[in-house]
Image (tube, helix red, strand yellow):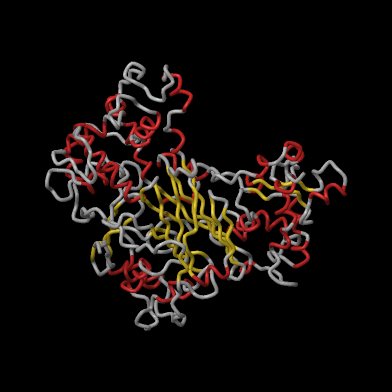
């Protein structure tokens, strides 16, 4: 088990506060400690009785979750500061780098623990990250790379020169000059041996922009509660504006929501009710993110366990999915009614509520996609699964409040690094599927020379060899994934968007009242309105994170593309189904095609002769 850095505030001690990207120091005096004690939640609040441990129903071999290496993240590599006693020490590579990342999601309905096995091709994210660092070290000194080899003769100056001369790999957002080499060496050479090792190199090259390790989840509480109270859809349905949805208002929800359809296409798109956040979106200011357990975070590396235990209360004992309290309810091992620093760390090893797999660079798809691996038994009994590949959602009507949790992924790198087949065929004069030295174009970059691309040494370079090298030599961000977790901006919109395609189709509008009906004659006040939580994964250059996360995540393609020509032309709003209002035939013809009599003709129904 690797050591983690934990600092408890004590009288006149130096508290080391880790934020997402920067390490800051703050002298904590006796007065400050006193003020915290008066404003913090009552730590003596009694916890709920411990339920029976939950069993996980697994569909793949169980994977053990271990501590990940702690890594200080740097935002400015040109910062002329020596390594101080508070900088994090170098840690040996994690032998269990194939373990999934563990997510801690504090929703309004309780805490959810989720393990995500992120795959880059046939490697785990951690393995891909380690191999890429080894590749950087070998290439920096011009030595052939072997599995697990490290360049023994690599010096700091050689590494700095290599990084400066390869902006296509490391980006040019942060620059540094040779005059800064000595200060940078003092900053990054944690073990003072004058030679960069694996972890020090990772800290340098991945710390150039934002996150230093292979993965980081950040969260915000900006939308918490406001995403229901200030919902534009709620305002449209709540005809008397008393903040309570009466049964009669729920029954007329379809008609009320249709008034928001500005373009008259009989569906509600996200941009009709959810304007794109501004570039300076206050929700994701770093001051709103922490490692204290108040917002979404991963449990890899540094976690402020002391503060997390200090602020933990009984309201977090429930699970947003499942009938029983989740794994967090078992934390009070000594049954003293309190959760201390040692007990709270069981979150790292407790049975996860959900285990997911997220694949990038897969042979099955050019886009990232999710698989459900396993779910705790009671979660599986109550949850409803909505899986369209590129996003996966879980809903539980029985939670308090009813909860929907969606995971989605976006890749801004995958398709931009590969040479298209058409370009390759233009160079392949004899059409034999390979480029010999005569056909191979002059390339000024030695890393793309004929000798380096011809991996099998057969005297020809294939398209696969070229693209494999281009992907391997792409920006480092190919082996790094970042995520954001928070409440959906409009919980009612997210709740009604059952297929997660980013719009409310005519079908979803039609049945919106039924979707909001949680019992005959039941009115919904703010506390009982459904909530929604989203975790968005992103791979790409972190300098574009704010823009990439602001843009809508990729959604599934509608079934319109699978329809016969007449049906696709009839589906005027392109939501993949034909309603009675769109159908141009007779009522009898519509009823004959609508085999399940639900009021819509689907792609499969339209294909029947």
**Residue 563 visible here:** yes
Q: Does residue 321 lie above or below 207 as drawn?
A: below
Q: Does residue 225 lie above or below 593 as drawn?
A: below
Pick the residue in front: 24 or 349.
Answer: 349
Q: Position of residue 165 (x, y in %)?
A: 27, 29
> What residue lies at 34% left-to-right and 37% top-to-bottom?
472
Pick the residue in front: 594 or 543.
Answer: 594
Q: Is residue 100 left or right of residue 133?
A: right
Q: Is residue 196 left or right of residue 400?
A: left
Q: Position of residue 325 (x, y in %)?
A: 49, 75
Q: Position of residue 258 (x, y in %)?
A: 75, 50
- Please state, as top left, top right, bottom left or bottom right, where the N terminus lies in the image: bottom left
Q: Does residue 425 lie above or below 95 as drawn?
A: above
Q: Does residue 337 lie above or below 160 as drawn?
A: below
Q: Position of residue 517 (x, y in %)?
A: 71, 66
Based on the displayed image, in which of its 4 quarters is residue 475 positioned? top left
Count of all numbered marks drawn on residues in the image: 0
- Please state, as top left, top right, bottom left or bottom right, where the C terminus lies in the image: top right
């Amino acid at each position: 088990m690797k050591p983690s850095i934990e600092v408890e505030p004590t009288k006149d001690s130096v508290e080391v506060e880790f934020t997402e990207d920067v390490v800051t120091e703050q002298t904590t005096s006796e007065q400050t400690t006193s003020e915290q004690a008066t404003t913090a939640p009552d730590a003596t609040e009694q916890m709920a009785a411990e339920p029976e441990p939950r069993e996980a129903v697994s569909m793949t071999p169980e994977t053990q979750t271990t501590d990940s290496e702690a890594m200080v993240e740097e935002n400015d590599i040109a910062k002329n500061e020596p390594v101080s006693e508070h900088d994090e020490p170098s840690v040996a590579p994690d032998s269990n780098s194939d373990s999934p990342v563990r997510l801690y999601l504090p929703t309004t309905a309780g805490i959810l623990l989720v393990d995500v096995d992120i795959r880059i091709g046939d490697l785990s994210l951690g393995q891909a990250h380690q191999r890429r660092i080894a590749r950087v070290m070998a290439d920096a000194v011009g030595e052939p790379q072997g599995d697990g080899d490290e360049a023994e003769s690599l010096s700091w100056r050689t590494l700095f020169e290599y990084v400066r001369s390869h902006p296509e790999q490391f980006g040019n957002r942060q620059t540094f000059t040779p005059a800064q080499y000595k200060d940078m060496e003092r900053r990054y050479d944690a073990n003072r041996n004058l030679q960069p090792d694996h972890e020090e190199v990772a800290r340098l090259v991945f710390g150039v922009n934002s996150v230093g390790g292979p993965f980081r989840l950040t969260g915000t509480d900006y939308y918490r509660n406001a995403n229901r109270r200030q919902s534009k859809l709620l305002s449209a349905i709540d005809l008397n504006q008393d903040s309570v949805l009466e049964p009669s208002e729920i029954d007329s929800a379809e008609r009320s929501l249709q008034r928001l359809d500005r373009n008259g296409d009989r569906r509600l798109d996200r941009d009709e009710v959810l304007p794109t956040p501004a570039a300076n979106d206050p929700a994701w200011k770093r001051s709103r993110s922490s490692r204290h357990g108040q917002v979404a975070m991963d449990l890899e590396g540094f976690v402020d366990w002391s503060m997390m235990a200090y602020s933990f209360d009984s309201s977090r004992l429930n699970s947003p999915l499942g009938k029983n309290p989740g794994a967090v309810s078992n934390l009070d091992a000594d049954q003293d009614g309190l959760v201390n620093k040692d007990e709270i760390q069981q979150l790292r090893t407790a049975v996860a509520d959900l285990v997911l797999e997220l694949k990038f660079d897969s042979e099955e798809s050019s886009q990232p996609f999710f698989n459900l691996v396993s779910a705790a038994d009671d979660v599986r009994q109550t949850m409803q699964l909505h899986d369209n590949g590129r996003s996966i959602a879980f809903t539980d009507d029985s939670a308090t409040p009813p909860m929907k949790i969606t995971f989605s992924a976006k890749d801004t790198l995958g398709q931009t690094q590969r040479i298209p087949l058409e370009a390759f065929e233009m160079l392949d004069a004899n059409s034999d599927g390979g480029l010999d030295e005569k056909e191979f174009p002059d390339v000024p970059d030695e890393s793309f020379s004929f000798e380096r691309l011809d991996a099998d040494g057969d005297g020809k370079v294939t398209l696969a060899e070229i693209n494999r090298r281009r992907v391997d030599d792409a920006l480092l961000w190919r082996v790094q994934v970042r995520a954001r977790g928070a409440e959906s901006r409009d919980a009612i919109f997210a709740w009604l968007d059952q297929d997660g395609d980013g719009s409310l189709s005519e079908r979803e509008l039609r049945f919106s009242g039924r979707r909001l009906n949680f019992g005959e004659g039941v009115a919904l006040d703010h506390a009982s309105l459904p909530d929604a939580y989203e975790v968005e994964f992103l791979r790409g250059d972190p300098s574009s994170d704010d823009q990439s996360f602001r843009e809508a995540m990729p959604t599934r393609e509608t079934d319109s593309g699978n329809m016969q020509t007449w049906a696709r032309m009839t589906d005027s709003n392109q939501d993949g189904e034909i309603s009675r209002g769109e159908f141009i035939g007779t009522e009898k013809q519509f009823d004959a095609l609508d085999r399940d009599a639900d009021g819509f003709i689907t792609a499969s129904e339209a294909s029947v002769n």
